[in-house]
């Protein structure tokens, strides 16, 4: 039962993230939606697979992939946002705070 709940939650996060990627106005908010998709959705689905397989070598490999996603996804999204800002891509008008412009004038 736990596997099914984790899998459905992961799929729901993936769907909501995909809708966010389509609906959000600029690269920074779309990057936020895609990061939530990858981290929340993929981790939930991988945990569901681990719970389904039990304690095996396969589940250890799945958990290793989950840890790597958890650690590397924020780093990669930050690097993409910083590169977009350095290339001159401006946030949309509705963006309230531009932290990169404050830190790197």
Image (tube, rainbow, N blue to C red):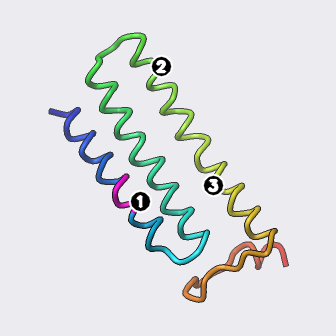
**Is disc 1 in contact with disc 2, using a CB cutoff of under 8 Å?**
no
Q: Nearer the viewer, mark 1 or mark 2?
A: 1
Q: Secondary structure at mark 1?
A: helix
Give the residue at mark 3: 77
Is residue 17 highlighted in magenta?
yes
Q: Which of the labelled discs sits on residue 17, or is there none? A: 1
| Extent of the magenta region | 14-18
**Is disc 1 in contact with disc 3, using a CB cutoff of under 8 Å?**
no
Q: Which of the labelled discs sits on residue 61, or is there none? A: 2
Say whether disc 1 or disc 3 marks the residue closer to the N-terminus.
Answer: 1
Q: Secondary structure at mark 3?
A: helix
- In this rendering, position of residue 82 left or right of residue 70: right
Residue 53 is drawn in which quadrant?
Answer: top left
Q: Nearer the viewer, residue 86 or 96?
A: 86
Residue 38 in picture, x, y percent from top left: 48, 48
- In this rendering, position of residue 53 left or right of residue 101: left
Q: How many neighbours does mark 2 have within 10 angstroms: few (below 14), some (14-19), or many (20 or more)?
A: few
Looking at the image, residue 76 lies above or below residue 18 = above
Residue at 51% x, 25% y is 64
């Amino acid at each position: 039962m736990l596997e099914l709940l984790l899998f459905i939650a992961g799929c729901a996060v993936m769907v909501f993230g995909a809708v966010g990627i389509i609906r959000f106005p600029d690269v920074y908010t779309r990057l936020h939606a895609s990061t939530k998709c990858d981290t929340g959705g993929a981790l939930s689905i991988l945990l569901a697979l681990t719970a389904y397989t039990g304690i095996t070598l396969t589940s250890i490999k799945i958990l290793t992939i989950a840890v790597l996603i958890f650690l590397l996804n924020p780093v990669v999204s930050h690097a993409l946002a910083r590169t977009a800002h350095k290339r001159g891509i401006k946030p949309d008008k509705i963006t309230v705070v531009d932290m990169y412009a404050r830190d790197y004038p």
